[in-house]
Each structure stands twice: as structure tokens, then as C-alpha cells.
Image: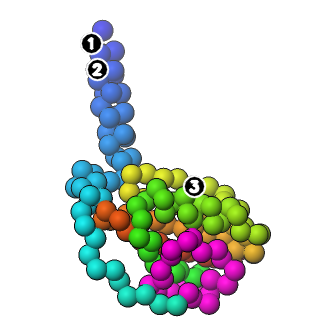
Amino acid sequence: MKIRGGLGTLTLAVGLFALTACEPFGDKDKENLKKACPAAPSTIQRPASLKSFPDASGIKYTGSQQKGPTIVVTGFLNVAISPAHQAYHAAVANAAGYQVTKEEQDAADSEVNFSGHSTSGQVKLVQSCKARTTVTITVRPN
């Protein structure tokens, strides 16, 4: 009985650790979702490197980098994570020649993976204040 109880306790401890280890944001990060947003970053025109990649309504671009054949574009949406996720999911799913290959949403971040037009990649969304979600679009050639 003692061995069995020890294994049960160990299993419970490992399970609780796994649950807390998988939580990407702690209490402090969740508090950030309630705080006011600082001034918005400077914006740029829509990067030509995005070619036919769909825009979510309201996206404002802040930067673009070429990393070898990969394009990384940054920006933000003036909404919380859930509407931002929905906006990018809909934009990709409804764009001709693109499809959502995987998606995930947590309390303050989400991902929308995609493929189409001989590319694949990810839209990474992170909410760090009450009403703004940062957007990082990574596009790779297939």
C-alpha cells in the first residue's frame, strides 16, 4: 500500500506540474490583459513582400524583415486576442488559394498556421495590454 500511495502521489504531482508548466501565461501576464495600452507604435505601408497574403480588417503594419527566403512582418490590431484570432482565421480561411492548417488560442496568445500560393507559415498573435494584440506573420516558400 505504501508503494502504491507513493506512486499515486508522484503521479498527481507530475500531473499538476504538467498542467502548470503548459500554462503559457502566469497571473502577472494575465494582469497585463487588463492594463491600459501605451501609445501605438509607428506604422508603415503594407509590405509588398506579403504579396497576396490576406489582411485582417484593421491590421496596422510596423515592420518587415527578409530572413533568407522567409519573410517576417510585424504589426498590431487594436482589439483583444479573441477578435484578433477570429479576424486572422477568417481572413486566411476566406482568401482564395489559402487554407488554415492548424490553429490554437490561449488566454493571451494564439496561432493561425496556413498554407497557400506555394507558401506556408504562421500568424502569431499576442495580447499584452487591454485592447491591442501584436501580430507576427511568418511566410516561408514551400
Between the residue at mark 3 and the residue at mark 1, the CA separation in whole angstroms equals 44 Å
Q: Position of residue 65 (x, y in %)?
A: 51, 87
- Residue kind at label 1, given as amino acid type: Lys
Q: Residue at x 41, y 70 (%)?
A: 78
Q: Give the side of residue 5 with respect to residue 22, left or right.
A: left
Crowdedness of circle 1 by 10 Å Cα count: few (<14), some, many (20+)?
Answer: few
Q: Please count the marks in the image.
A: 3
Q: Quadrant of the C terminus?
A: bottom right
The image's mark for residue 2 is: 1
Q: Position of residue 98 (x, y in %)?
A: 72, 67
The tag earlier along the polypeptide, 3 or 2, is 2
- Residue kind at label 2, given as amino acid type: Gly
- Residue kind at label 3, given as amino acid type: Glu
User: Looking at the image, do the residues carrying marks 1 and 2 touch, with CB atoms under 8 Å apart?
Assistant: yes
Q: Residue at x 54, y 58 (%)?
A: 86
The tag earlier along the polypeptide, 3 or 1, is 1
Residue 125 included in the magenta stretch of the image: no
Write down the region rendered in magenta.
Answer: 46-69
Q: Residue at x 62, y 61 (%)?
A: 90
Tell me the residue that label 2 is attached to: 6
Between the residue at mark 3 and the residue at mark 2, the CA separation in whole angstroms equals 39 Å
Tell me the residue that label 3 is attached to: 103
Q: Is residue 103 above or below residue 132?
A: above
The image's mark for residue 77 is: none
Q: Quadrant of the N terminus?
A: top left
Mark 3 lies on a secondary structure that is: strand
